[in-house]
Amino acid sequence: MKTRDLVDLAARNLREALFRNSLTTVGIGVGVASLVAILSLGVGLQDLANDRLAKSGLFDAVIVTPRAEFPGFGRGAAANPADAAPPKPLDDQAREAIEKLANVVEVYPEIRFPTEIHYDGKPYPTMVAGVPQSALEGGSFDGMKGSFFSGPGASETILQIDLARQLSDQPDSLIGKDLVLRYAERTPLPAGTGADASAGGFSIVPHEQKLRVIGIVETEPSAGIGTFGRGRLLIPLQLAEKLQATQTNDLRDLLRDTPEKHTYENLTARLKNAADVPAAEEEIKKMGFSAFSLLDATRSLGQVFAVFDMLLGIFGSLALVVASLGIVNTLVMAILERRREIGVLKALGASDRDVQRLFFAEAMAMGFLGGLVGVAIGWLISRVINLGTGIYLTRRQLPTINVAAVHWWMVLAAIGLSVVVSLAAGIYPASRAAKLNPVEALRYE
């Protein structure tokens, strides 16, 4: 039997029992729709997590710290006792050297210090954090009220919402207002001051800085290792460095032979992309510092999402398996109704294989059409989920996100799986039809 004749005959048979075949196709479509809808949630959440992590700068960042004083102790401990040389200071000279490495976009320190702010004649203790200008690209300030810093050294501040609520019952009214930042400034002392003429050092004096509130952020942005998190009052990083506020590592510098030399507790080196991170880590380690990134730790995240998607796919496929039983039922009923037709085909020379191909063609047609219908319904469900999520978040004054996503590979996979399951469901009816005795089939009324 020619392929064209086979297709025409299968199409005619499907049209003759249109209502029953349509119900079977819709059943397959519902199964495919449930699969696509469930997978769209898993894939959408994975895309959301990957996008947030990528924008956070954690994947393309290397955290640089001094090596430990003694091998085997501390985060930056040397791997071998032979490497137990005096640690190199992580100072401005080291910062400049790291900035000159290939593919390094910027190098900045983590600046956080306790302070006291004065607003409306009242003091409020809080924590200040310096924010690099590049943080605007990371998405941490998406949906914030107000605006970002006008410049890297502007005397401006962005408040975390909890601090803003402490300052005023109407946090939005703080935008455009001024407040005073009181902090402990580190002032270097010239050599020869004090009892030891050879010693320098630094003094700690109170200082004030006037700041203009330009924005309020709902959540604490980028509270990751080596980033600008854990601060309730955010200021430009360049301004934070200019203030020379006393930090915890200053006490460590005070105990060393050169207390007047300022060092950093850690530095964050941002690369052009995540692929440049391993090479940069090796170069920084050769310079005598410890370097680590979150890239290695987050590689297992892909495995977790893969298992998660697999489990969602298994549960979503159950509806498709149930729908395949409808195909078996439809084709078995077709055999009973068309026994005489099958006998005529065999009497005219159709082989058992031709009969099998005919029923497989009908099963494949129902599976393909059901897959198309299911993908369309699944896509609509994902859109409804995103719309409902957006409405829910908007009512709570939160930025909207897409929690469901339908990718092109999901469309192809869903249609392909629908066809495969339909063909598998057609094996029994096709085999049963092929085994019919043509003489007995012609006698059937």
Image (cartoon, grey):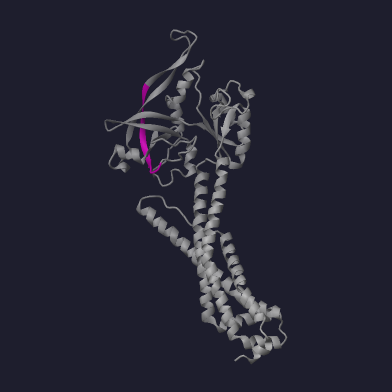
Residue 319 visible in this rendered orientation of the protein: yes
* Residue 385: quarter of image: bottom left
Q: Which residues are magenta?
A: 206-219
Q: Where's the N terminus, which quadrant? A: bottom right
The location of residue 104, given as percent across then percent down, is: 58, 35
* Residue 7: quarter of image: bottom right
Exactly how many numbered labels are in the figure?
0
Where 108 sits versus 8, above or below? Answer: above
The location of residue 398, given as percent across then percent down, is: 38, 50
The location of residue 271, given as percent across then percent down, is: 57, 38
Where 177 sits versus 427, above or below? Answer: above
- Would residue 156 be found to the left or right of residue 173 on screen? right
Which is more toward the observer, 117 or 208? 117
Where 428 sits versus 292, above or below? Answer: below
The location of residue 20, given as percent across then percent down, is: 52, 80
Residue 362 magenta: no
- Residue at screen point 59% across, 62% down: 413
- Residue at screen point 27% across, 41% down: 169
Residue 215 magenta: yes
Q: Where's the C terminus, which quadrant? A: bottom right
Which is more toward the observer, 202 or 285? 285
